[in-house]
Every structure is written in structure tokens, then in C-alpha cells.
Image (tube, rainbow, N blue to C red):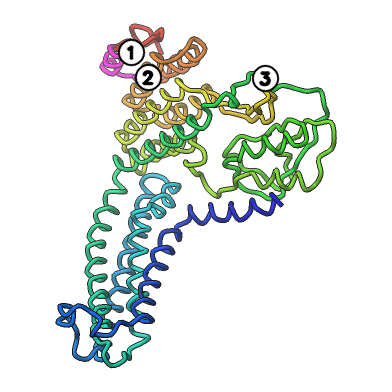
Amino acid sequence: MSFLLFWPIHLLKAFRQSIAYLPSLLALAYALLSLVALLLPISDDRLPPLLTMLGLEAPEETRALLAALLGGMISLMVFSFSMVMSVLSQAGGQFSHKLVFGLISERPHQWVLGHYLGTILFTLMLLMVPDVAEGQATWRSLAIYLACAMVVHCLALFVYFIHNASQSIQIDAVAADLHQSTLASMERLQSRQQSKEWRILAVAPSSGHRQHTVHAHRAGYLQNADLTALADLARRVDGVVHLHFRFGDYVVEGLPILSLEAAALPEASWCDEVRATLTYVEGESITEHHVFGMTQLMEVALKALSPGINDPGTARLCLHRLTDLLRRRLEWRPCDALFDQDGTCRVTWQVEDFESLLYRLFQPILRYGRDDLSIGLGVLKALKTLSLFAEQQDLDILQAHADRVVETLSHAAGHPLDRRFVSARLDDGLHRLSLPAALPDR
């Protein structure tokens, strides 16, 4: 029974995260309003006398006005979202194609689309029922005036839409949005893991029972899982669930994705309930997994360093955002085990450590920008900043990366002027790294 309840919940979550969520709700609200205007007419003698002064003499002759409003709204909608396609094409070519869906699915854009669709639907409903009973002209006239007001409102939204779309592809806005989305995802995960049931384990505990493997029944990106529900399922069979993937990994059908450490073999229905707790999301969802926000910032930096764009300033801007996110990651380590209230471990999963994350984010930027001294100095400055917040184990990792940056700078700086400029900034600033006073010989 619980397995059957999971799928409607997942479908509802998928719909809520889709582009059609807000437009559908707004269009439904406009449709209900049009039904009120058409199916619940109020006679003129029941309306306030002031409203009768707004009545049109012949509501049935307003079809031309409504048709013009409908045609104008359709043209406005087509023009608006043809402009969106142009903006997204530019954003994908300049930054990263992974940002395209994020720009489309922004809530402000969905609000505008919903009001456009709702206004078209409201006007179309008025055109479909042109006749009005005698003595009800004022009520229909109010509906027509309301349609005109909706169109004026959509014109104001069009101006807002142009401004918002043009602002959304500026690098400052893109980097700030990725930074804020990643930070919000990290804070949600941190707040969820505050209770004593969430713990950090160096080695997954073993009960000595046999491990029973559960395979994936579909391919896709496993972005997250309902760990609390998994713990309840593990408690039901008195076992421990071990996840064999990292959140965000792509799994193929038939891959062993988790195992149950228990005395008895789990039933097929139990395995189906376990699979239903897993969240598949196409693409990279920052909401589900905060590491994707960091990697997208890194990819924007790589795109800026490509020969076709050659914008190291954008890469340095992304480095600044990454430094802040990694600093917060140093201060907080995600949990990798969930216990029940009796103190028994029920679920374990894999978490990417700081060393892997640092290498994945900084080394591609250093490699693609190895010929640009400003990029090397920018990476070194980021490592210096992180060293002020690192414990000894993480400090050793930062030191190893700093040594590689110094080596890269030494190979890139061939002219004596360049070497003197870089050497003066190697050990500059407050940090805890061991850096040379000058570049080593090439």
C-alpha cells in the first residue's frame, strides 16, 4: 500500500518542479473567473447604480473588440517567448547549456506565461458566449472591461519580462543565482541533519549478516532519496541499507544500487518500496544536490576560458563564488548515516569528501587557464583564503594544490617581468600555507 502512495507523491513533486506548474494554476484561476462571468450573471437591478454607468449599450457588438484583444495577446505571447529562445541561445553559448533549463523554469517567467495564457483563455471564453440575456448587460460589460484590464496588465508584465530576461543572462546575475541556489540547498540539508539520528561515520558498521542486493529497474540520474523512509523500511526488516551510489550519479538499468544487510532475504514488495523512495531527476538539480551548483559555476568558468570567449574576468568571478561555497563546506561536513531512535544504524550512503570536491572544481580551471597568470593567481588566492578555515587534514590537501599552482605559474611566467610580478604575490596576504618567496626555476 505504501508503495502505491509513493508514486502519486513523486508525480506531484515532478509537476511542481516543471515549467507548467504555475502557468497551469494561473490558467485554471482565469478559467474559473470566466465561468463566474458567464454562468453566474447578475441582473442590472441587483447591481449598485454606479456600475450601470459603465455598461455598454450592446454587449453583443463587442466581439470585434474581444477578437482584437485575443489576437494581440497571442502576438504578444509569441513575441515574448521567441525573445526567450534568443536569450537562452545566447546564454547557452556564452555560459553553459545546463543553465538553459534553469532560466526557462524561473518562477517570474512562469508567472508571466501563466498570466498570458489566462488572459487569452478568459477572452476566448467571452467570445464563445456572445449572447446575453435582457437586463444583464452591465454584468457582461464588467467582464469585457475586466478583459481590457487584463490585457493592460499583460503589457506591464511584458515590460517587466524584457527587463528580467535581459538581466538574467548577465554574468553577475548568473553567478549570484547559482551561488544563492547552492547555498540554499546546503542550508536545507544542514538544517535537516541537525537531529542526533543523523551522524558521520568513518566506516560503515557491519552486523555480520549477509548483504542482499537491490538492482535498479530504470536508468537515470539518482539525485536524492527519502532517507527517513529508507530507515523505516530497514527497521521493518531489522536490517541496514547501504547505498552504493553518490547522489547525482547516473545509474543504468540492472545496476546494484543498494544492499540490505539483514538475516532474511527481503520480499519483492519491500524492494519495490525501496526503489520508490529514490528520486530520479533528469539533468542536474541544484535543489536536490548542492554539489551541482558548484560544478556549474566551474563549468561557466571553463566556458569563459575557452578560446571562443576568452573572458578570464568571468572565470575569476566564478572563483570568488566557489571560494565562499567551499569555505562553508569546510565548516560543515554532510552526514553519511541515519540511525533510528534506539541508536541502531539503518541507512548509510556515500558523501563526496573535500579533497575530491576541491580537485573537481579547481584543477579544471587551473588546467584551462594555465597560460593566464591572473587565473593562476586567482586560484592561489582562493586556496590561501580556504587555508584560514581548514583543519590540519584539509590544510595538507590545500597545500598540495597550492604547490601545483606555483608549479603552473612558474611554467607560465617566462618573461622576467612576469616572474617578478608573480613572485611578489606568492606569499602575499594572510594565509596558513607554506609558499616560496619567489617562483622556482623553470
Q: Callout 3, which amino acid?
A: Val
Q: Earlier in the sequence, mark 2 or mark 1?
A: 2
Looking at the picture, does residue 269 appear above or below residue 439?
A: below
Mark 2, residues whose alpha carbon is within 10 Å: few (<14), some, or many (≥20)? many
Rendered location of residue 99, percent (x, y): 42, 47
The reply to whether callout 2 and callout 1 are in contact (CB within 8 Å) is: yes
State the SS at label 1.
helix
Mark 1, residues whose alpha carbon is within 10 Å: few (<14), some, or many (≥20)? many
Q: Earlier in the sequence, mark 2 or mark 3?
A: 3
- What's the magenta bit mostly, secondary-structure-wise? helix
Looking at the picture, does residue 29 appear above or below residue 351?
A: below
According to the picture, the residue beneath numbered tag 3 turns out to be 203
Q: Callout 2, which amino acid?
A: Leu
382 and 117: which is toward the camera: 117
According to the picture, the residue beneath numbered tag 2 turns out to be 380
Rendered location of residue 261, percent (x, y): 78, 30
- Determine which of the numbered discs, if any, sits on residue 271 in the image: none
According to the picture, the residue beneath numbered tag 1 turns out to be 426
The reply to whether callout 2 and callout 3 are in contact (CB within 8 Å) is: no
Looking at the picture, does residue 261 appear above or below residue 66?
A: above
Q: Which residues are magenta?
A: 409-426
Q: Marks 2 and 3: which is nearer the front?
A: 3
Q: Earlier in the sequence, mark 3 or mark 1?
A: 3
Alpha carbon separation for disc pair 3 and 1:
39 Å
- Quarter residue 240 falls in: top right
